Structures are given as structure tokens and as C-alpha cells.
């Protein structure tokens, strides 16, 4: 990222956030809230109307018994929700299962919480979906939680219902907690997003989501956690020593985002689907795209044929072709034969960046 930042003409295929502004009505609501005096602390768990709106949103989406507003904790980004969920249940020395590849912050959060990360594999041969039998085999007496992510970063994989049901069954059988990171839930290209809320036992599942991706609000730092009923007060109390509460102005903007018509969310998803199709056009007929992304805005491209490691390849692509991608090894040791691209730039730049990437792979392939 630092290397790319120093080169003004770089095509950025590394950035993990929507390239659109936050919709204007949301920004207007923040201005109004600030002027109306929403410039003080909010309760630790967030503003009551926002918690109610998040619970209502869940009741429209989930087929299972919807959460009550008491189960919602508003957090500083989805990252705050992830951290709160683990801090609520982890004791020092516990193990937490995380994916390889997976978003790098998972490993860091597990360490921060005093636990040991144990990796389960997401393999290209399974469309980068986890193998429930492998997960079950990794559970020991020290395993406290399993972290999953659908739609997935960096894979673009979306869990089908049958897989989610199998994972929920493992959680039910073993009594571990399930933390389901569903921050990309609105960006699904085929079929539908399957929430862990519809499968896992309510007293064992935390759902993590937020505003960053659906509403292009990464900088507002606003997310939420849906807790098991008996753990929401713990998760809420945990806000006090860490952030006290999410920004009150951002929370008012979040209320406007959820209350407004959801056209911008549908449009955002359509744009990412179109760009996903550009990736498929460029790489779909080659072995370089081992799995077609079904959601989020990422794809893993196989650089294995070049014989280069992912950091080496990414640096070479940046310096020789002015195109930035993320080395796969960032996401876990199994991912060194891939680079991650994000479709978070204009169609035109994306097309050109993909062309450079493909040519560079070809030029290194013996
Ligand atoms: C898988 C995943 N979870 C969570 C987050 C963090 O979201 P937020 O910006 O709401 O903290 C990201 C951001 O890139 C992500 O990729």
C-alpha cells in the first residue's frame, strides 16, 4: 500500500472499500444531527432508535425468530463488533478457529483477545468454502469459537444454506460460539445471502455486520453486533473501556441509511456484479480464476504458474505495470500462490488493470 501510494499513476486493485461517496441523504442526516445536538456520548450499546431499526431489519431478513433490540450492540465498525464478540467469550489460552485465507484482522483480534488462532482451510477445489468435517476435526477442549465470513474476503465465496446448516450443527453439538462476519451481506451476485442467524442456536451465535460496505460508509466507523440474549449486556459493557460508544453523529447517519429507500444498496450491488463479470470475461476462460466470486468485491487470481511468491509478484506488478494488488500471503499461509484484486475502481481502470495483470502473469509463465 505504501509503495502504491508513492506512485501517482497506479491502477488500484488493492483497495477494500467501495469507490463511491456515501449517499447524499445520509450525509445530510449527519449534518442535521450535529446541528440538533447529537454531539454527546450515546449509551454504550448505541442509540435506542438505531438498535430498534437494526432489530427490525433483521426481522425482515431472517426467517428464524428475530432478535430483540436488546440483543443489538452498535459498534465502531464491524471490526468493533468482531472484537467485542470475542472479548465477551474468550478466556486466555482459548482457541478460535479462523479461515486460511481470511481477513488478516481476524488473526490479530484473536491474539489481542488472548486466544490462539487455529486455521481451517478454504480450498480452491471447494470454491473456497470451508469443509465442515475439517472444522469439526480441529475442535478441541480449548476451542471457544469459530469465526466464519460470508460473503468472503478475499475469496468472494458465498456459503450455501446446506453448508451453513452443517456448520450450525457442529456448533450445536460442541457448544462453541459461532461468530459470523456478514459485512458483505448486501453484495451477493447469485442466489441469496444465507445468515448464520437462520441456522445456528441463538444462544451461541454472534452476527457481525454494519454500514461500511452496503452504504459506502467505511470512514464513518459504524457497525453492529447481534448477540446471544445473555451476552448483549457483556458486549455493551465492553464498549465503555474501548470506545465508550460509536460516534453519535455517525449513528444518526446510520438511522437515515436504514430508514431511507434502499435503492443505493441495490445499485451498488449491481455495479459490483457488472465488474465481477469483467473479471470473469478477462480470466474466466483460464485457470487463473479458480473460483468465480459470488459476492463481496474481491477475486483471488492464481499466480502459481509464474513460480513467484505473492509479495514478489505484487511488487513486480506495481513497479513494472503500475498496478496494485494485494499479495495473497497477507490472508494466510495457504494463499501465497494468489493475489487479491478488488473491483473498487471504475470499469475502465479495472479492465486495464486486469489486462496488465494477465499479461504480467503470462510474461512470467515459462
Ligand atoms: C471481512 C471483513 N470484515 C469486516 C471488515 C471491517 O468492516 P468495518 O469497516 O465496518 O469495520 C472488513 C473490511 O474490509 C472485512 O473485509
Image: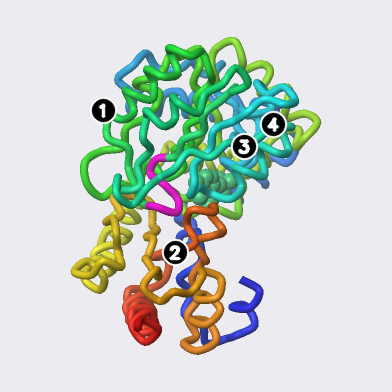
Residue 281 can be seen, yes or no: yes
Compared to 219, does 275 lie above or below?
below
Labels 3 & 2 near each other (Cβ < 8 A) = no
- Alpha-carbon neighbours of circle 1 within 10 Å: few (<14), some, or many (≥20)? few
Marks 4 & 1, CB-CB < 8 Å contact = no
Question: Would residue 154 be counted in the magenta stretch?
Answer: yes
C-alpha separation, residue under disc 3 versus residue under disc 1 = 26 Å
Q: Secondary structure at mark 1?
A: helix
Query: Does 362 appear above or below 35?
Result: below
What separation in Å lies between label 4 and label 1 (alpha carbons)? 29 Å
> Mark 3 and 4 residues: CB-CB less than 8 Å, in contact?
yes
Residue at mark 1: C-beta within 8 A of ligand 1: no
Single out the mark in the foreground, 3 or 1: 3
**Viewer-closest of 71 and 103:** 103
Instruction: Report how far apart the C-alphas of labels 3 and 2 lie in the structure.
Output: 22 Å
Between the C-alphas of marks 2 and 4, the distance is 28 Å
How far across and how far down the image is residue 351, in percent?
A: 32, 78
Residue position for label 4: 115
Residue 14 in the image, given as x and y percentages of width and height: 50, 67
Q: Which residues are magenta?
A: 150-155
Relative horizontal placement of residue 265, taking residue 51 as reference (left or right): left
The residue pinned by badge 3 equals: 117
How many neighbours does mark 3 have within 10 angstroms: few (below 14), some (14-19), or many (20 or more)?
Answer: many
Task: Quickly name the residue at label 1.
Answer: 162
**Which quadrant is the C terminus positioned in?**
bottom left
Q: Residue at x 26, y 38 (%)?
A: 192
Q: Is residue 212 visible?
A: no
Q: Earlier in the sequence, mark 2 or mark 4?
A: 4
In the rendered image, the vertical position of residue 316 relative to residue 39, given as above or below: below
Amino acid at each position: 500500500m505504501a509503495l502504491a501510494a508513492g506512485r501517482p499513476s497506479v491502477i488500484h486493485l488493492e483497495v477494500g472499500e467501495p469507490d463511491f461517496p456515501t449517499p447524499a441523504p445520509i450525509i445530510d442526516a449527519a449534518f442535521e444531527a450535529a446541528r440538533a445536538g447529537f454531539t454527546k456520548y450515546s449509551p454504550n450499546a448505541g442509540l435506542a432508535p438505531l438498535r430498534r431499526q437494526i432489530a427490525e431489519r433483521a426481522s425482515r431478513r431472517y426467517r428464524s425468530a428475530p432478535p430483540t433490540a436488546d440483543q443489538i450492540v452498535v459498534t465502531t465498525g464491524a471490526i468493533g463488533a468482531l472484537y467485542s464478540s470475542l472479548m465477551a467469550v474468550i478466556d486466555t489460552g482459548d482457541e478460535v478457529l479462523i479461515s486460511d485465507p481470511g481477513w488478516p484482522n481476524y488473526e490479530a483480534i484473536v491474539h489481542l483477545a488472548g486466544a490462539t488462532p487455529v486455521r481451517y482451510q478454504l480450498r480452491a477445489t471447494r470454491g473456497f468454502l470451508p469443509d465442515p468435517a475439517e472444522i469439526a476435526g480441529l475442535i478441541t477442549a480449548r476451542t471457544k469459537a469459530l469465526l466464519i465470513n460470508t460473503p468472503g474476503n478475499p475469496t468472494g465465496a458465498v456459503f450455501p444454506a446446506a453448508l451453513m446448516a452443517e456448520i450450525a450443527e457442529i456448533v450445536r453439538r460442541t457448544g462453541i460460539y459461532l461468530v459470523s462476519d456478514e459485512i458483505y451481506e448486501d453484495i451477493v451476485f447469485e442466489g441469496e445471502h444465507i445468515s448464520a442467524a437462520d441456522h445456528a442456536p441463538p444462544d451461541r451465535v454472534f452476527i457481525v455486520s454494519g454500514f461500511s460496505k452496503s452504504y459506502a460508509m467505511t470512514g464513518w466507523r459504524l457497525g453492529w453486533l447481534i448477540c446471544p440474549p445473555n451476552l448483549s449486556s457483556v458486549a455493551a459493557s465492553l464498549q465503555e473501556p474501548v470506545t465508550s460508544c460509536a460516534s453519535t453523529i455517525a449513528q444518526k447517519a446510520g438511522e437515515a441509511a436504514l430508514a431511507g429507500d434502499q435503492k443505493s444498496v441495490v445499485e451498488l450491488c449491481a455495479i459490483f456484479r457488472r465488474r465481477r463479470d469483467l473479471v470473469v470475461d478477462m480470466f474466466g476462460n483460464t485457470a487463473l480464476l479458480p473460483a468465480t466470486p459470488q459476492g463481496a468485491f474481491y477475486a483471488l487470481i492464481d499466480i502459481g504458474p509464474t513460480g513467484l511468491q505473492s509479495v514478489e509478484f505484487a511488487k513486480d506488478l506495481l513497479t513494472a505495470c503500475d498496478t496494485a494488488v494485494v499479495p495473497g500471503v497477507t490472508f494466510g499461509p495457504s494463499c501465497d500462490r494468489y493475489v487479491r484484486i478488488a473491483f473498487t475502481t471504475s470499469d475502465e481502470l479495472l479492465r486495464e488493470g486486469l489486462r496488465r495483470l494477465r499479461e504480467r502473469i503470462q510474461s512470467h509463465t515459462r
